[in-house]
Amino acid sequence: MATFVIEGGHKLSGEITPQGAKNEALQVLCAVLLTEEKVTISNIPDIRDVNKLIYILGELGVKIEQIANDTYTFQADAINLEYLESEKFKQDGSSLRGSIMIVGPLLARFGKGYIPRPGGDKIGRRRLDTHFEGFIKLGATFRYNKDEKFYGVEADYLTGTNMLLDEASVTGTANIVMAAVMARGITTIYNAACEPYLQQLCKMLNSMGAKIRGVGSNLLIIEGVQVLKGCYHRILPDMIEIGSWIGMAAMTKSSITIKNVSWDDLGLIPRVFQKIGINLERRGDDIFIPEQDSYEIQNFIDGSILTVSDAPWPGFTPDLLSIILVVATQAKGSVLIHQKMFESRLFFVDKLIDMGAKVILCDPHRATVIGMDHEFSLKGTVMTSPDIRAGISLLIAALSAKGTSTIHNIEQIDRGYQNIDTRLRAIGAKITRVE
């Protein structure tokens, strides 16, 4: 188990470029299974979860060629469906939650898709019902082997239908869309997720010959086609990493430029950071965060305490609530953080309390943060990363803290952030990786 050792309290400076979006990559990589023609994808992040999915695609028989540091070609013209029922696949697929999204395209093109119960972050229950209920509505037969924890769907063909999703699941919507693009007839999906990464998937599918309308809304209308072709697709920058760097600049009182952020796809993210007092400027397609000795949390206009909560897009993404919480520990003022969409994601605050933060954990979903306005620094400590988002939040806290911090289980952080220690050292961070 690898470890980060961080010497905190140093200001950072310079430019940092966000990696490609992990959540988009996991979707669009699965979409290559929908065609036998070559698909080229660029800005692919070099992180564990994405590399694991690329490996699984290779085991499935997809021809994969890396033609640049962040660019690959994929050609799924000789798929090995026997791999899906192998013990090796049960092991490979169970280690990556994103592997669930191979089921939709395999079902659409080959009439069957299997997956072991996926793993992933320990951030509370994330149901798969939306995925499989959607496939069933399209005409698939569902089966589940309880002993082996193995899911399967099969169909001679899929038929378009109307469906209302019980939750606006991003991966569920993506999976159903990839199945519906080759179904017979028209499919309408109400309460569809509309995150930028889902929009990107739909744009990619349309460039492959799919017929999807309503992209960017919560009502998608999909006219099925028989065959899809190859395409070129570029992945958006990762909005979660962009938010992480904004928070890091504020906590360390640093001046940083975040390059090529695709500002128009960031939604509420800049505004929420501004509400907790962080100055940031749009410079072309870059974000510039000037050095700030203090930042003050805005109250609501009636004077009541600010509440920051998550919601499906276009609401504020749940993946950045932990960053907001950490940054608020050194703000002037107080804020209530309300994590509505997942339970257990706020339990990392006990580590912040150990570092000297003033945080009251009200229940598994809510925490009140009393900012210290940089009057008292957090202090270095030893901690373990429980998941990707809490891990990066604890890393940001450590960078701002007085003294040395040690973070164990950094493999969790590596799953979501590409070469993070190397990139942070380039802007002045004192961080060392110990294997």
Image (cartoon, rainbow, N blue to C red):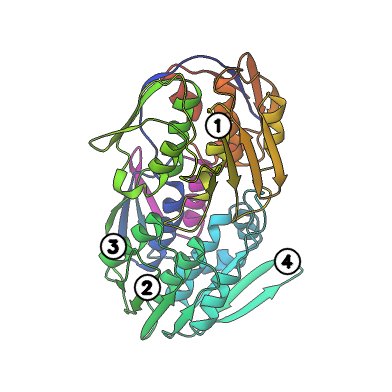
Q: What stretch is highlighted in magenta?
A: 46-71
**Residue placed furthest toward the right:** 147
Which quadrant of the figure has residue 384?
A: top right
Q: Is residue 349 visible from the viewing direction of this image?
A: yes
Q: Which of 62 and 117 is in front in this view?
A: 117
Q: Where is residue 372 in the image (x, y as percent from the top left)?
A: 59, 24
Asked if the residue at tag 1 contacts the one at tag 3, i.e. Cβ–Cβ closer than 8 Å, the answer is no
Cβ–Cβ below 8 Å for labels 3 and 2? Answer: no
> What residue type is disc 4 on?
Glu
- Residue bearing mark 1: 333
**Residue 194: which quarter of the image?**
bottom left
Foreground mark, 4 or 2, reads: 2
- Spatial distance from mark 4 to mark 2, Cα to Cα? 35 Å
Q: Residue at x 71, y 66 (%)?
A: 149
Residue type at mark 1? Gly
Q: Position of residue 347 (x, y in %)?
A: 70, 42
Q: Can residue 158 be seen in this view?
A: no
| Mark 3–mark 1 distance (CA, rounded to whole Å) | 53 Å
Q: How far apart are marks 3 and 4 (CA)?
A: 36 Å
Q: Position of residue 386 (x, y in %)?
A: 67, 39
> In the image, what residue occupies the spot 57% across and 66% down?
84
Disc 2: which residue: 220
Q: Which mark is drawn over residue 148?
A: 4
Element type at marker 2?
strand
In percent of width and height, residue 124 lies at 67, 54
Q: SS class of the residue under badge 4?
A: loop
Residue that mark 3 sits on: 230
Disc 4 crowd rating (10 Å Cα; few below 14, some 14-19, many 20+) is: few
